[in-house]
Amino acid sequence: MSWWPIFEHGCWDTGHVKSVHDFSPAGFRAAYEEKGWSQGDVARAIGVSVNTVGRWVRGKGAPSPRLFSALLKELGVPRSRLLLPLSPDADLAVLRTRAGLRQEDVAERLGVQPSDVSEMELGTGRMREEWAVTLSSLYDVSLDRLVKAREETERRWRERFDAGRRGGR
């Protein structure tokens, strides 16, 4: 992968999940305009540049989980208003970022290290059974949807693993 971020699965990928998946530029724009705000008003309210807000409106990026949470609070809208519908192939990282959470936030709620959450999202670590109810609540999804996301995470890990093995021959 080159050093330049790529857009895949609804997220700007810089090697780590740093932006909210499935962010809806149209939903975002409608929300701040209905409030009578400009891009500058949004930028001042959450502490970013007007250029950053403009990139989000144009679909050239998306807010981080922290900034997404700030948008929800400042605009006074439900999370679903600023998101596209959940993709059937959403993985665990997608569920977390859609909830406006960082790996550190999830780790704190689970009583584990952030590396445990990272490994779970990469597919190199397992999702412990005792985490399921907490994660379902944190991500605001059913247990069935959480299991599907875990399966998708593991499927992607297997694909990367198999591709690496084929490339090494």
Image (cartoon, helix red, strand yellow):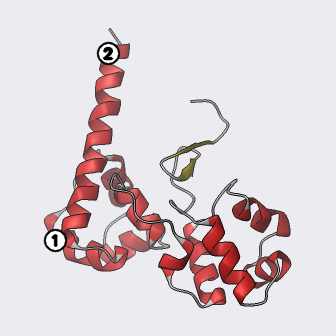
Q: Is residue 70 left or right of residue 111?
A: right
Res. 168 image quadrant: top left
Res. 138 image quadrant: bottom left
The answer for how far apart the CA atoms under marks 1 and 2 are is 35 Å
Identify the residue at horizontal 37%, vertical 69% (top origin): 107
Tell me if I can see residue 125 in this picture: no
Q: Indicate the secondary structure of the residue bearing disc 2.
A: helix
- Pick whichever, 78 or 69, lies toward us: 78
Whether tag 1 and tag 2 are in contact, CB under 8 A, the answer is no
Residue type marked 1: Glu
x, y (%) of residue 77?
56, 87
Q: Nearer the viewer, mark 1 or mark 2?
A: 2
x, y (%) of residue 110?
30, 74
Q: Residue tagged by mark 1?
A: 130
- Pick whichever, 33 or 56, lies toward us: 33
Identify the residue at horizontal 62%, vertical 30% (top origin): 2
Q: Which mark is residue 166?
A: 2
Q: Is residue 96 left or right of residue 141?
A: right
